[in-house]
Every structure is written in structure tokens, then in C-alpha cells.
Amino acid sequence: MSQAELASLVDVRRETIVNLENGKYNPSLKLAMDIAKVFDKKVEDIFFFEPDEDDDDDDDEDEEE
């Protein structure tokens, strides 16, 4: 399947698919689910989460004490 075909099926621009493939764009939950549906896969079979290197769980300012 071409990038253009996938983009058309999930109603985004081809550039969005290119950026997803290159790791320059994180999809919305809806887009991730739409892409997974096209390939008859689970979202977690296609996408995975990698925290930013700058993220430090020990300094979570939103955490209640």
C-alpha cells in the first residue's frame, strides 16, 4: 500500500504518513486507531511509546505528596 493510499483511507495528507514513518509526528488516538483498523491490527501492534530522554519521573511536579 502506498503512503498516498493509506493517507486517503485515514483522511490525512500523505506528508502526515511520511512524518509518522520517520518518527517526526505522534498520531492522535483516532488516527492511530484508524491506521490500525486499515491493517486489521491492534494499535499497540503498530505504534509504541518511547518517553523523551528529558523526561524524569522522579521530578514530577504534578504528583501529589
Image: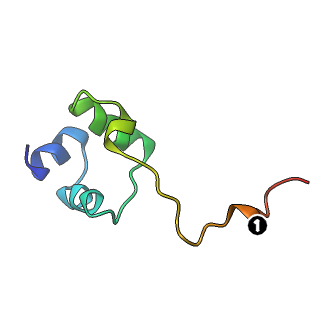
Residue drawn at point x = 47 percent, y = 57 percent: 50
**Extreme residue in the top direction:** 40
Quarter occupied by the N terminus: top left
Determine whether, in the image, residue 36 is placed left or right of residue 18.
Answer: right
Quarter occupied by the C terminus: bottom right
Q: Name which quarter of the figure residue 59 lies in.
A: bottom right
57 in relation to 54, above or below: above
Disc 1, SS: helix
33 in relation to 21, above or below: above
Residues 58 and 46: in front is 58
Residue drawn at point x = 29 percent, y = 57 percent: 20
Label 1 neighbourhood size at 10 Å, few (<14), some (14-19), many (20+)?
few
Q: Amino acid at mark 1?
A: Asp
Q: Where's residue 30, x and y in %?
A: 40, 39
Residue drawn at point x = 66 percent, y = 66 percent: 56
Instruction: Report which residue position mark 1 lands on.
Output: 59
Q: Where's residue 31, x and y in %?
A: 35, 43
Q: How many marks?
A: 1
Determine whether, in the image, residue 57 is placed left or right of residue 32.
Answer: right
Q: Name which quarter of the figure residue 15 lies in.
A: bottom left
**Extreme residue in the bottom direction:** 54
Q: Where's residue 3, x and y in %?
A: 13, 52
Q: Name which quarter of the figure residue 5 lies in.
A: top left
Residue drawn at point x = 41 percent, y = 48 percent: 48
Q: How is the image coloured?
A: rainbow
Q: Where's residue 29, x and y in %?
A: 44, 42
**Extreme residue in the left direction:** 2
